[in-house]
Image (cartoon, rainbow, N blue to C red):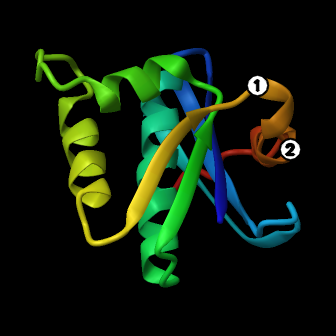
């Protein structure tokens, strides 16, 4: 199963959104998810998208997941085994814990064109006005 994820920030940092699509072996859409973050940069939004996408796939019972992201920086931070300190360490550690569970997960870099459906979520959310409570 393919899990395409994307995260984006307006202002970088600023209002941010993440989302993803689960597709079957033919590329057909199965399920989707999205969320927003009050304040994050693009890398953090991408990492949150990857983390929530993996949680979503785990909870749906998938055992073989190809997680596809267009953010090579996020993928590199997750795959880094040196444990160098960085500002995203809590997120990357959470993602590594998810990946270490009893399932097969691969992280794959994909071109931005493959993330266009996820980016549509961003454009819709970006146009939604804030409600101050």
Viewer-closest of 124 and 42? 42
Quadrant that contains the N terminus: bottom right
Q: Are marks 2 and 1 in contact (CB under 8 Å)?
A: no
Check disc 2 and report the residue beneath it: 120
Q: Is residue 79 above or below residue 91?
A: above
**Mark closer to the chain start, 2 or 1:** 1
Q: Can you tell which of label 2 and label 1 is closer to the viewer?
A: 1
Query: Badge 2: how crowded within 10 Å, few (<14), some, or many (20+)?
Result: few
Judged from the image, the secondary structure of the residue bearing numbered disc 2 is: helix
Query: Badge 1: how crowded within 10 Å, few (<14), some, or many (20+)?
Result: few
Q: Quadrant of residue 18?
A: top right
Q: Is residue 78 above or below residue 63?
A: above
Residue at horizontal 78%, vertical 26%? 112
Residue 88: x and y in percent read: 26, 27
Residue at horizontal 43%, vertical 37%? 47
Viewer-closest of 63 and 55? 63
Visible in this render: residue 41? no
Residue at horizontal 77%, vertical 69%? 24
Check disc 1 and report the residue beneath it: 111
Judged from the image, the secondary structure of the residue bearing numbered disc 1 is: loop
Residue 133: x and y in percent read: 51, 57
Q: Is residue 87 above or below residue 39?
A: above
Q: Is residue 41 above or below residue 33?
A: above
Residue at horizontal 23%, vertical 58%? 100
């Amino acid at each position: 199963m393919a899990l395409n994820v994307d995260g984006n920030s307006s202002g970088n940092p600023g209002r941010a959104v993440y989302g993803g699509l689960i597709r079957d072996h033919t590329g057909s859409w199965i399920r989707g998810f999205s969320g927003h973050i009050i304040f994050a940069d693009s890398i953090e939004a991408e990492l949150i998208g990857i983390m929530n996408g993996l949680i979503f796939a785990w909870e749906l019972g998938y055992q073989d997941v190809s997680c596809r992201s267009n953010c090579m920086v996020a993928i590199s931070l997750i795959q880094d085994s040196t444990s160098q300190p960085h500002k995203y360490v809590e997120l990357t550690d959470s993602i590594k814990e998810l990946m270490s569970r009893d399932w097969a997960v691969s992280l794959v870099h994909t071109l931005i064109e493959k993330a266009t459906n996820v980016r549509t979520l961003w454009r819709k959310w970006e146009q939604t006005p804030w409600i101050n409570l």
